Amino acid sequence: MRGGFITALTTAALLFGFAAVADETAVPLGDAENGAKIFRKCSGCHQVGPDAKHRTGPLLNGIFGANAGAAEDFFYSKGLQRAAADGLVWDYEHLDAYIENPKALVSGTRMSFRGIKDEQDRHDVLAYLRRFSDNPSNIPEAEPTAQHVEVELPPEILAIVGDPEYGEYLANECLTCHQAGGSDQGIPSITRWPVEDFAIAMHAYKRKLRPHPVMQMMASRLSDEEIAALAAYFKELEE
């Protein structure tokens, strides 16, 4: 009887110990407020909040527990599509690995981001994003996630509908550096860029607000209609 009681106590202690370890290792704690600040470096491509929409990267509402590649109306890279077909789920472990080094987790991703190397910074960002997976519709968009617009373009420029066939003709020079397949080898991919993002970037180079002499020179040669044509072409470019 005494031996059985001791065995029961030992088993209970072991189970309690395992549960405690699981609680400690399941989801590391992060500072969501600091994570909001760190997320600013991500907000040029990703948005969160009730008014979030896809940009160069998909919106991140409800990302925790979601299947990879599942956001509606977003065109994913072939690398991400392969990972999704292999069953990748955005749990805490995989989100942490992805933002540490995107290309190490998903080969061929278009995400041209070097990653967040500091472990606590990653935990803070994930704690912030977790808010938008609990009930994002009830959480107002935080100011730090608002996208910084480099150039405020007049509505008439943004309203220009570009001719993708003309854009294809103009794109030969662009494709001497940028990879049509979306590969990022030190030069950011512009395949599948949203039209507005492309136009804003090119006008920022044209006005020398973006510091790249070659791009400044190339953008200065383009008219508003030609920029719109290039934007239309690259938006629909297949990998």
Image (tube, helix red, strand yellow):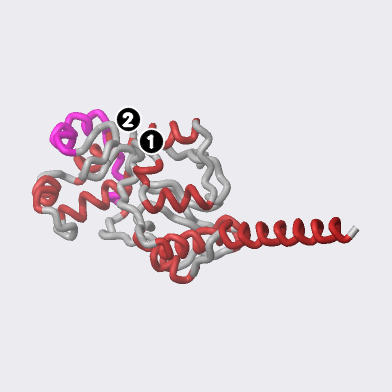
Residue that appears at 18% across and 60% down = 209
Amino acid type at mark 2 = Glu
Residue that appears at 22% across and 30% down = 168
Q: Judge whether 121 appears above or below 212 on screen.
A: below
Q: Position of residue 214 (x, y in %)?
A: 10, 48
Amino acid type at mark 1 = Ser
Residue in the foreground of this view, choosing between 80 and 3 = 3
Side of 29 where 23 appears, left or right: right
Q: Judge whether 178 appears above or below 204 on screen.
A: above
Side of 8 where 158 appears, left or right: left
Quadrant location of the C terminus in the rendered image: top left
Q: Position of residue 86 (x, y in %)?
A: 50, 32
Q: Position of residue 154 (x, y in %)?
A: 28, 56
Q: CA distance from mark 2 to mark 1?
A: 8 Å
Question: Sequence-wise, which precedes: disc 2 or disc 1?
Answer: 1
Question: Mark 1 sits on what residue?
Answer: 77
Q: Which mark is residue 239?
A: 2
Asked where in the image residue 21 lies, by quadrant, the reply is: bottom right
Which residue is at the far right?
1
